[in-house]
Amino acid sequence: MISGRADESAVITGLLRAARSGRGGALVIRGEAGIGKSALLHHLDDDGMRLLRGSGVEAEAELPYAGLHLLLRTAAHRFDELPAEQADALRTAFGPGGADRFLVGLAVLTLFGLLAAERPLLCVVDDAHWLDAASAEALLFAARRLDTEPVALLFAVREPHAPEFPAPGVPDLRLDGLDDAAADALLPADLLEDVRTRILAEARGNPLALLELPAIRTALGYEPAPPRTPVQRMLAARIAELPPRTRTLLLVAALADTDGAALVLDAAESLGASIEDLAPAERAGLLHLVGGTFVFGHPLLRSTACCGAEVPRRLEAHRALAGRLDRGRRAWHLAAATVQPDEEIAAELEESAAEVRRRGGYAAVAALYERAAALTPDRRQRGRRLIAAAKAAADAGRPERAAGFVADTAGILTDPVDLAEAAGVDALLAQDRGAQPYRALIEEAADVAARAPELAGHLLFRAAKNAWESGDLAAVVDAARIADALSRTNSDLVAALARAATGFQRLTSGGATDGVAAVREMRSALGPATGPPRKRVMIVWSHVWLGDFRTAHNLAAALANSCRAEGALGALPDAVAVLALAQMQLGMHDEAWASGTEGLRLAQELGHASAAGVLTVVLAHLAAVEGDDERCRSLLSDAREHGVPPVALRATRALNLADLAAGRPDAVVARADDIAAGLTRMDARNGLPDLVEAAVRTGRPERAQEPCDWYVDWATHIGRSWAAAIAQRCRALLSEDPEPHYAAAVRLHRDGDDVPFERARTELLYGEWLRRRHRRVDARVQLRSALEIFERLKARPWVERAREELRATGESRVRASQPRLTPQERQVVRLAATGLTNRDIGAQLFLSPRTVGYHLSNAYAKLGVTSRVELAHLPDLAV
């Protein structure tokens, strides 16, 4: 089925179904050029019907029976089976002489019946408006008499702007534009958001326009291009027939970024056109004035008028519009009207870019800076504007464009400060790809520290972070040494950046006291969670490092939403990665699956290797919790190979969970050195409790004491209840009198229940200990609570372990399993339950509305519901 044409397809399918059962009929499909008539005819489900295809041809529209001959030429060998008079009429019609029109029509009807006697017949006539009159008459004669024949006859007719095709007695099917969701699904996924919005408005749901416009529509207007399709060539020919002043009016209206007639007429009058010149365009059906607004007769007319105009006329029209617009919109038209370098216009474009950046819209910012650079006479200034374009393109998630802008600065920039700016963008792109070019950043920062301390501070902060993530502690020290000198500057911002950079050295060399203090200082130095998206990502991570998953979740969710709204796709994979991680820790496993799946797809599409590594490990962790050992290891094989050291450590943690779940504690202890060899104990902290449990289970508590001590120290300094609870659990496992520690752990978990999976693990261990002490009633309290959480989290091996322990206490109970949705279905269902439309959901998840509908229908079937209203009433959505 063609996207967005379900109702129309159903009408045609009904006609074909009726024809196959002996109740034939005909249908005339009408619509404007490019609306999808031919597509419908080429995607018919004929289900074994015999097919005859024909078409009207403009060049043969005056030749009697030319169209009928094209349709019936493959059946000419059956003419002898017709009654003699009818056969003669057909042969005469296709020859040089005249023919009896009634007999020709009757012969067509008889031939259709003859062919359909063997199997049902489908006849398709495209471009029927170009049929010669004799062919049209004969076919319509037959069309009105098919009700007892297994024959379906379909005509496709373009209107308006084509010869009329009256078909009395034959029903019509009128094709209008696609709805917003179906139209959006036809556009390329990587289209700039502002260009997407403009194309959707201009195309008015016309499929051909939706397919053609992305090739020529840019943020700055239309790229000159010859007409590529028959429809565009037809429109161009009709424009060429207009008087010159009418073409001028049409061009100004096409170039204007508003349909307001007053502004268009004002600009057109400066070029010699007036309202009187509208009449020829109206008569031709090309341009109409409706309620103070100009309306084009076809969605491709605007682009055809722009692309087909001569360059001098197009430049004049842009200048005329620029002189009548406010400063922001004026810059776009001035840029389009200028072919020589012009600093005044370039500066105005730069100002517009700064204004657009304040509102978001990073892709448009990149386009403005790119055009400004092209118009800049001074080489250094041109290079600086190219760097600004590169930064905006990187923020927009367009790394190839950003890299291209940086490459264009080669040989233009020579000043060390400018070169450092370029190196910073290049390093950012490399980091997204998974590389860590921190040494180059340190060198650039050292070169510009005296002249540009703020730039040096930014470079050192990123260099220290990258080196820390890569495990290059010597590079961390080098970055911190330069940053320490910067920290004594008079600038508060530079000093804050320097302190943040030196904080990574304290993370690598200090204990929990220094590490926690360093993270807090970094967060303070970065300031509030506002401003550039990539800065906000670092702030969110600082909350994760200190175990404040609730705040991290809220900030990451807000950041992801703003990235989507502003088109800041460069930071979106990082935002979704930390969101998925926080959701996992908070026990929101369904949401984490959905966020992780969405984020990984997006990260892979954007080439964002570092975010992909984090997201892969989150999904592997979830698979480990659920006992899907094969999936966990499959995900981790890639993450461990390509991820940076922190990703590798998290991968080790996921493997340890999988082994603990499968009853393989020896494998966990065997990896103790991997955890201990982590670049800092701050990174290894979350895996330490698993090592403590595994060491105790294998009868080697001496291997557990050091990781236990470190974890207790870290938990004390971050001040989070859940971490303090796990610390008490570790102490319990090593204590000769564990109950006070277990009791304290359970109390702390329940006081601040931010990490439910860890709470359930604590309750399970406590319950096991109580059962072994024959305190079955007390054990059941802990085990029931643990089982309830494990079941909610779908932690299958942990569920089985808790059930076995409960059975050992003399209790046995069975829970019905819940319907299981895929991660994408979960995400779609949760958004649909809030009342969002498929288009809104698609915008959030970067899916087409059609794909959203597919996931939603699958989820409905699994959940036994039929509407969004029912979804909203499901307990916890039952997913």
Image: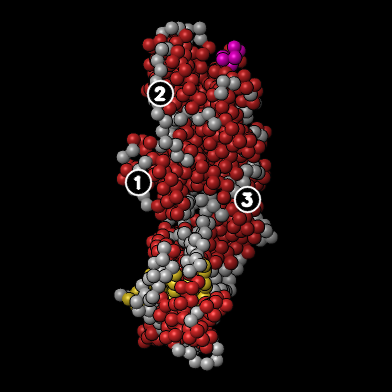
- Place of residue 110 in the rendered image (x, y in percent of width and height, measured from the top left): 46, 77
Q: Hey, what amino acid is under mark 2?
A: Val
- Which residue: 51% across, 23% down? 714
Residue type marked 1: Thr
Residue 358, horizontal then vertical, whole percent:
44, 55
Question: Which image quarter holds the C terminus?
Answer: top left
Q: Nearer the viewer, residue 180 or 88?
A: 88
Do we see residue 777 in this rendering?
yes
Residue 238 in the image: above or below residue 188: below
Q: Tell me the SS state at disc 2.
A: loop
In this rendering, the count of numbered labels is: 3
Please tell me the numbered disc located at residue 426: 3
Q: Which amino acid type is marked by label 3?
A: Asp
Residue at left offset 53%, top offset 79%: 79
Q: Could you say where residue 458 lies in the image, as x and y percent from the top left?
A: 56, 44
**What residue sits 43% from the left and 16% below the top?**
806
Element marked by disc 1: loop
The residues bearing labels 2 and 1 have C-alpha atoms spaced at a distance of: 29 Å
Sequence-first tag of 2 and 1: 2
**Does residue 697 belong to the magenta stretch?**
yes
Q: Are marks 2 and 1 in contact (CB under 8 Å)?
A: no
Q: Which residue is mark 2?
A: 814
Between 179 and 500, the one lying in front of the other is 179
